[in-house]
Amino acid sequence: MGLFGLGKKKEADKVEEKVTQAVAAKTDVTGAPDLQSNNKRRLIVACGSGVATSQAIASKVKSMLQNDGIDYPVEAVDYKSIKTELKSASIYLYIAKPDDEVLEQAKALGVNVFAGVPFLTGMGADQIYSDIKDLTK
């Protein structure tokens, strides 16, 4: 590799380091507060298309929260966009178990992850909902 390629790699490493530090410090890469992460209050439900199953579960969870007097944003999303969606979420309900990379990203971002299928079957939904309710206060 020539000198020009080496310089680009070093520059890329510096940018990656700044982004990593910014995420950890909840700032943007310039050092300014990252408003998106400071307002990270959203529950997302993800399935393959973001239409049928995730929409049904999102609607059910939103209704349960409203019945308990809790106003909390709930949104159905498609799994293809999950890495982007996690950045503005605080709670993630999955339909199919996400891959390790997504789970690691969620952990790094401080996103709480729960199974969503119990909201369809009714089995185990009470405990998960109780945990979600505690997180929305």
Image: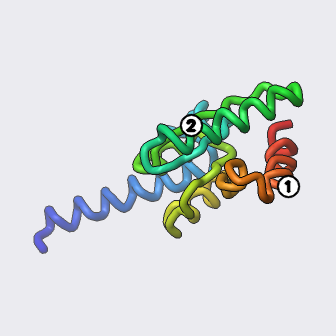
Amino acid bearing label 2 = Gln
**Relative depth, front residue between 20 and 103:** 103
Residue for badge 2: 55
Name the quadrant containing residue 117.
bottom right
Residue 19: horizontal and vertical position, in percent? Answer: 47, 51
Residue 91 in view: yes
Residue 77: horizontal and vertical position, in percent? Answer: 50, 40
Quadrant in which the N terminus appears: bottom left
Tell whether 63 sits left or right of 51. right
Residue lying farthest left? 2
**Relative depth, front residue between 92 and 63:** 63
Q: Which residue is found at the position 78% from the left and 58% from the top?
A: 123
Residue 38 in view: no
**Relative depth, front residue between 135 and 74:** 74
Q: Which residue is found at the position 64% from the left and 49% from the top?
A: 92
Quadrant in which the C terminus appears: top right
Amino acid bearing label 1 = Gln
Q: Secondary structure at mark 1?
A: helix
Residue for badge 1: 127
